Image: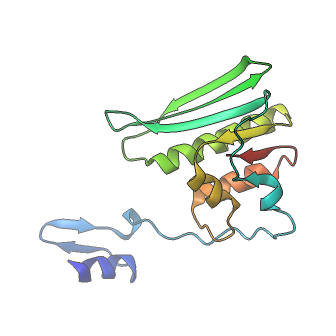
Amino acid sequence: MESILIRVGRLRRDCNWEGSSFLYQDFQQPNLPVMIHTANFDSEEMVSIVSDPHPPAEAIYTDGSLLEDETCCIAFCDIQNNVKIHQWTAKLSQHNSVFQAETLTIKEAINWTNSKGISTSIWSDSQSALRAISSFKSSNPLIQKTKQALLQNHQCNLSG
């Protein structure tokens, strides 16, 4: 079985084994990291991982979680002066991970602030998502898209 996976994954050749078809196009291929120059993405200024026990009254809060039926639910909420201004929710497939849910929620919150031209802080409880976004080593396509969205609004920052 291992030789079949090597043949399909590394040699990029379709293969049949014991009545099962393994197609190269069905295998996830690694993406090259987006080349963002460090001068353009100041991760220390845009992403703060140090937790603050008193987040600001005006901010966007994000969360992604796994429900009992193993589907991921994601949401973000814009709060200003203790009043909910906007809320966004979505349900993901049972195949998505909590990390994907948390990261997608952050990306959607950034996209929403970009569409409104809002200057704000986006708060997340996902240390893993924040660390991946602040890293230059991630080749995850969702992380790359999140970074690109964050670069479109220099008035928006992430905190956790």
- Looking at the image, is 80 positioned above or below residue 42? above
Question: Measuring 60% from the left and 40% from the top, which residue is drawn there?
Answer: 105
Q: Nearer the viewer, residue 37 or 9?
A: 37
Q: Toward the viewer: 38 or 79? A: 79
Across and down, in percent, residue 75 comes to: 57, 31
Residue 33 position within the rendered picture, expressed as x and y whole percent measured from the top left: 64, 70
Residue 19 coordinates in the image, percent (x, y): 13, 66
What residue is drawn where x is 62% and y is 36%?
62
In this rendering, would 30 be left or right of 50?
A: left
Point out residue 9 in the picture as x, y percentages from the top left corner.
37, 76
Observer-nearest of 13 and 4: 4
Q: Is residue 9 above or below residue 45?
A: below
Q: What is the residue that sits farthest to the left in this orientation?
A: 18
Taking the spot 78% from the left edge, 39% from the top edge, the residue there is: 121
Q: How many marks?
A: 0
Q: Quadrant of the N terminus?
A: bottom left
